[in-house]
Image: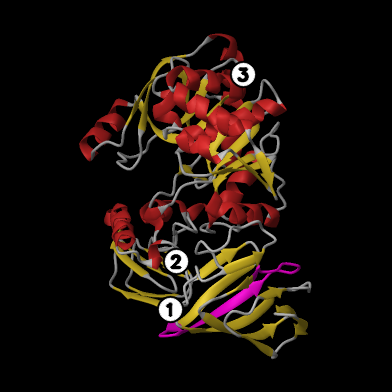
Amino acid sequence: MFIPVVLCGGSGTRLWPLSRRLYPKQFLQLSADATLLQETVRRVSSIDGALPPILVCNEEHRFLVAEQMRAMGSRPEAIILEPAAKNTAPAAAIAAMYALKIDPYAVLLVLPSDHVVRDVARFGETMRYGISYAQAGGLVTFGIVPNRPETGYGYIKYGEELEGAYDGLSRDQFDLRAYKVEAFVEKPGIELAQEYLKSGEYLWNSGIFLFRADSFLKELERHNVDMFKQCGKAMMELSADLDFLRVEKGAFLESPSGSIDETVMEKSSIGVVIPSDFGWSDVGSWSALWEVMERDNHGNVVVGDVLMHDTHDSCLFSSGRLIATSGLEGHVVVETSDAVLVARKDRVQDVKEVVRYLERENRKEAEQHRTVYRPWGSYEQLSQGERFQVKHIVVKPKCALSLQMHHHRAEHWIVVRGTAKIIKGDETFLLSENQSTYIPVGVPHRLENPGVIPLELIEVQSGSYLEEDDIVRLEDDYGRADGGGCDA
């Protein structure tokens, strides 16, 4: 038996404009009928002996994680919230400490939520093979056998092959090998990457780990005692909040940041690496996505409403509007409702520089899409001008926005589908399709969907200030703090 630990952090900036800080790539449905997070949970849950997963995510994404688990019918062992992003080592540490409460000999499979694996059966075989090494106390990682001189990945150099107690099981059942980790190396330049490929001694670093919880924590204490102690203090005051578990914020914020690689694996003498070939990609760029998705006869990946003429080896992604291309080769074109990206396929790593520019300029396009997801549903900005804004609001069945008021804006609600229960001041009433109501400035109000189908309405805001921090929450079903730039 083992416990998957799915790390749900990461910003995915190189997949902008589809991936945004408040809606990063792990929550996107890119190449299948599920999001990357859902595919990851489904993949690890299918392995024999897997217990329900522990998910670790940040505050801003907690309702997205919970909703995607509900939608796929998954019941995680826990969803643990990080007060701040501290990289993968503290996330793994708090998950390991939690797992020890379940089983003092718990084996953890720790992996990111935003990778693609094409050969799920081979993935499962490889993980099961690694469990014996983890149970014996080793810190196991999985190195991807490289097929090109890739500069976007870190590498692992492997040393002597491990023999002994695992020999018969490994070779007879799995046709796999395990080696001692000799070194982790950073992303190389192209010439060094070519040397790594030619030598046959290096593997791509997948960021997937398998170890006993107690073994990892002992090595963490040995190599970064401050991180170990602060994570321990944070877990001593673990508290429940709806479907989530919160660690103690102050202690966690005092923890150093660091990845599992640099904090533990690079310094440990018990590292084990298993060369792996299960069709892995970290989908870290549009060119990487192009490689893993199905292509047409001209080498194009096409999603959405796209018209092509004399177009080859390109990635064309439309989320709504028509994309028309002519004479294009080796390019990426991505359309969303508020941004369009056009880039050469061999330059897509530079997309992160575009995002940095947007962040410096405080552009909303770096943060979120026009459609914003909330625990009760979503809203989409349709139009905005001086002193007015129009939104399309969708409220899930049996859900409600917070009881709130605004100092600077009035709102007009028009129901287009479903039934709305309205609280407005001292009044409570129902609205059906094609009916509307007006909410004056300063009047407490609440919107609720009492029905069994999604409630849809058009909201017209008017006033001197229309930003999302003009919200005073008086009551909230989701325990959210007042204001803070988070709508409803």
Circle 1 Cα neighbour tier, 10 Å, few/some/many (<14 / 14–19 / ≥20): few
| Mark 3 residue type | Gln
**Rendering coords of residue 67 (x, y %):** 65, 57
**Rendering coords of residue 296 (x, y %):** 44, 63
Q: Earlier in the sequence, mark 3 or mark 2?
A: 3
Query: What residue does disc 3 label?
Result: 135
Residue in view at x 42 percent, y 84 percent: 385
Query: Would you say 198 lies left or right of 19 here?
Result: left
Query: What residue does disc 1 label?
Result: 322
Q: Quadrant of residue 478?
A: bottom right
Q: Secondary structure at mark 2?
A: strand
Q: Quadrant of residue 387?
A: bottom left
| Mark 1 residue type | Leu
Where is 206 relative to 450, above or below? above
Out of 448 and 396, give the one closest to the viewer: 448
> Which residues make up the magenta segment?
384-403
Residue in view at x 41 percent, y 73 percent: 338
| Mark 2 residue type | Val
Query: What residue does disc 2 label?
Result: 302
**Rendering coords of residue 47 (x, y %):** 66, 36
